[in-house]
Amino acid sequence: MAFTFSSKAELVFGVGAESNLERLLRANQAHSILFVYSGDYVFDLGIRQLVVEAASRIGAELIESGSVVPNPRIELVRELIQTSREHHVDFVLAAGGASSFDTAKAVGVGALYDHDVWDFFVGKAQPHDTLPVGVISTIPGSGSELSDCAVLQLGHDKRALETNVIVPKFAIVNPAYSRSAPYRSQAAAVADLAVGFLEPYFTDKAHIESADRLLEGGFVAALNAGRRFASNPEDLQTRTELHWLSAVMYNHCFLATGSENDWTTHRLEHEIGGQFDVIHGEGIAAILPSIIRYVSNRKPQRYAQLAVRALHADPYDANEKQLAELLANTLEEYFSSLGLATRLSQLGIEPDDFAGIAEHLTHGNTKTVGNYSPLDGDDVLNVLELAR
């Protein structure tokens, strides 16, 4: 429990929050702004016009790119770094969700680095500075709007960069904006949101009881909000809950402070997403129940505790393995209620693909995956088989 928590991000939350954009750009002394996004939502929601007008009022040059895609690619980041240098960009603004935000974060650190930005993602170098980044959220779930993490893809290789340097300077969150998100994308993000409370929870290392209680409460709130979303996607109050949970869930790992996070689910999904271009939340839904079922054969304790505390299971009516199975079943039913795939075959991933996933993820079975109960190559194959 020795740690430093620091976050300088300003969160402006609520309907009408976008009216603060000009003030925030002025506060960050933006003179040349790179604006990144994907899709028509920035036009449909009036975000692009808002940005154009704010830039004009503060006398800033505006450079735009609407080429961001899900599972964002390093190639676009490299192009935007070069564009940023040519235009002397001093502020990067992103609208959308994690794909746009992670692209902006990578451009921010890459523009001030003399070599290839991919160095940061493979651990060859560490960033020490960044162009300031601001975000406008249109979909809740990833927590990237306030996080110290960016995920990018080179070919089939999907990597994460985690550093305080890339925490956005501000996040504008108007829950009404998420009405533009396609149901499938939002449902996948909702799945990711619930699991975000679990990666720090699945640990057997020393931590404090209050962290468990906060994570349990967030997990239950995420499940409840997700179910309400599935029954009525248009409800503004539900979307407000989801946006707030997204900001709280990650928030520069506030709820995970002082604990060793597991990350088994995210690391395995990143491998699947990188190879098969699966939406992140869909990949999570397809593998997490099987991870719990497999790992609980040797370490069921934390799964069982969560089932008792969050799902109100009776510890006297079931043993720890049975309680872990209850948790896995509940999550599988939850993901299914959102309309998400709960089997790899539903995502077009077949048993013939499993060996390649395990081989690449564990570097030829020389490294393990996750921290709660580390998985070697054979373990990964067994999990994939359970999830087939």
Image: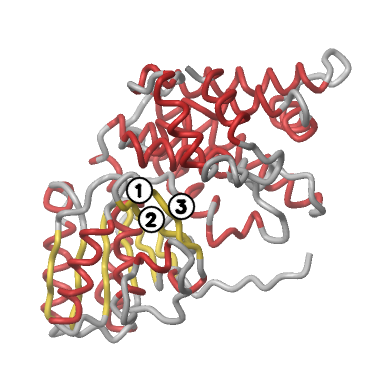
Upstream in the sequence, badge 3 or badge 2?
2
Q: Please say if 305 is above or below 321.
A: below
Residue 248 in the image: above or below residue 360: below
Residue designated by label 2: 14
Residue type at numbered disc 2: Gly
Q: Within 10 angstroms of label 2, few (less than 14), some, or many (20 or more) residues?
A: some
Q: In which quarter of the image is the N terminus?
A: bottom right
Q: Mark 3 points at which residue?
A: 143
Instruction: Please tell me how crowded label 1 is: few (under 14), some (14-19), or many (20+) other residues with Cα within 10 Å.
Output: many
Q: Name the one closer to the observer, 327 or 75.
A: 75
Distance in Å between CA atoms under marks 3 and 1: 14 Å
Task: Look at mark 1 in the image and give the residue it sits on.
Answer: 175
User: Residue 385's x, y, as percent?
Assistant: 53, 19
Considering depth in this image, is 193 or 174 the residue closer to the camera?
Answer: 193
Residue, x 76% and y 32% (percent of image)? 309
The secondary element bearing badge 1 is classed as: helix
